[in-house]
Amino acid sequence: MKFLDQAKVYVRSGDGGAGAVSFRREKFIEFGGPDGGDGGRGGDVWAECVGGLNTLIDYRYQQHFKAKTGGHGMGRDRHGAKGSDIVLKVPVGTQIIEEDGETLLADMVEIGQRVLLAKGGNGGFGNAYFKTSTNQAPRRANPGLPGEEKWLWLRLKLIADAGLVGLPNAGKSTFLARTTAAKPKIADYPFTTLHPGLGVVRIDAREFVLADIPGLIEGAHEGVGLGDRFLGHVERCGVLLHLVDASQEDVVGAWRTVRAELEAYDEALGEKPEIVALSKCELVPEDELATKAKKLKRAAKTTPILLSAVTGTGVEAVLRAMATAVETSRAENDESRAATATRIWQPIYRDRDDDRDDDDDDY
């Protein structure tokens, strides 16, 4: 299935049905009176978060979604039926944004979450509604109200526990293929990965989701290379594994380039837990590797892990460090959700004697 993380859709809710002008006419009933029914309400447009999806590819082939119009009112006080709703099914992590590309309407992060995108128009009143003691034969009815219409952006940000970042050709896809059942494209040239990939890592009876983000280059936050389109997928990761190619000359410069792009895109990305690893260690002599590791340690303020996804050196150490960081991130998220859930409004009861003036004799 082709990966698509952004789509523009047009939604329109249904118009309300028109009210009816009708009078009761039956044999032997002299004064029938008005009996025009009301129109039905138009259908709504909803967005629902569902499981089993990880791309917005369905919205590449269909961009227009229109709910049904409400049924018109009829005689004998028969009201029109409500128009059928239409539901846009989106994967977990989808953001719904206004046409301006900035105003966030909803962030779909839980399966089963539903958001109303466009409300259907109300149905019009039939002439039975306007019957009064002074106007016993009204000949008017309201048309249904029109529905809402708008263009929306759907933007998917993958929800993964950990993310792989680094310059192009840093060995991210090789590491993903080594540690998960994913089968990303692997080749000896930059920008092999053109879209994010996901895999499930299992280590010491623990498991977490790992995302492979396409390579970043200088100016990515401004649209250079693959641009900032995929940087959004890193926002939801609890920990970042920063792979630095040990076979290049300036490992410190490579690390700083990616760090600068992350922080320029969003300051919060620079504050995420980061595990630094020197990849492709099998291509570098030991003395040269030790020198580069010392330089990177001084710059990153952390000891880089020597990693080779081809030979398996350092793979388990990296996975265990990531699993520990993921558990810490999950615990913090659970605590924040619990704090939010227990923040329940309670009324403030005040003693009447506190508000009473001592000189007031009305009490």
Image: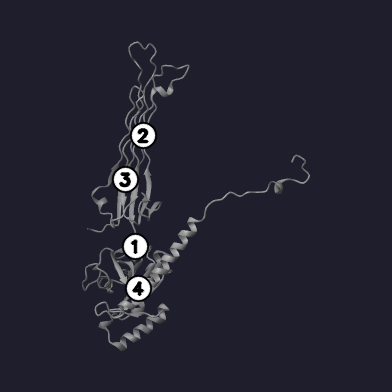
Q: Which residue is mark 1?
A: 233
> What whole-number distance in Å separates the C-alpha atoms at marks 1 and 4?
15 Å
Q: Which residue is mark 2?
A: 41
> What whole-number distance in Å separates the C-alpha atoms at marks 2 and 4?
54 Å
Please report whichever mark, 3 or 4, sits nearer to the chain's N-terminal start: 3
Circle 4: element type: strand
Please report whichever mark, 2 or 3, sits nearer to the chain's N-terminal start: 2
Please report whichever mark, 3 or 1, sits nearer to the chain's N-terminal start: 3
Please report whichever mark, 2 or 4, sits nearer to the chain's N-terminal start: 2
**Badge 4 amino acid:** His
Q: Nearer the viewer, residue 127 or 320?
A: 320
Q: Which residue is mark 3?
A: 87
**Badge 3 amino acid:** Val
Q: Quadrant of the N terminus?
A: bottom left
> What whole-number distance in Å separates the C-alpha atoms at marks 2 and 3?
17 Å
Q: Which residue is mark 4?
A: 242
Circle 3: element type: strand
Please report whichever mark, 1 or 4, sits nearer to the chain's N-terminal start: 1
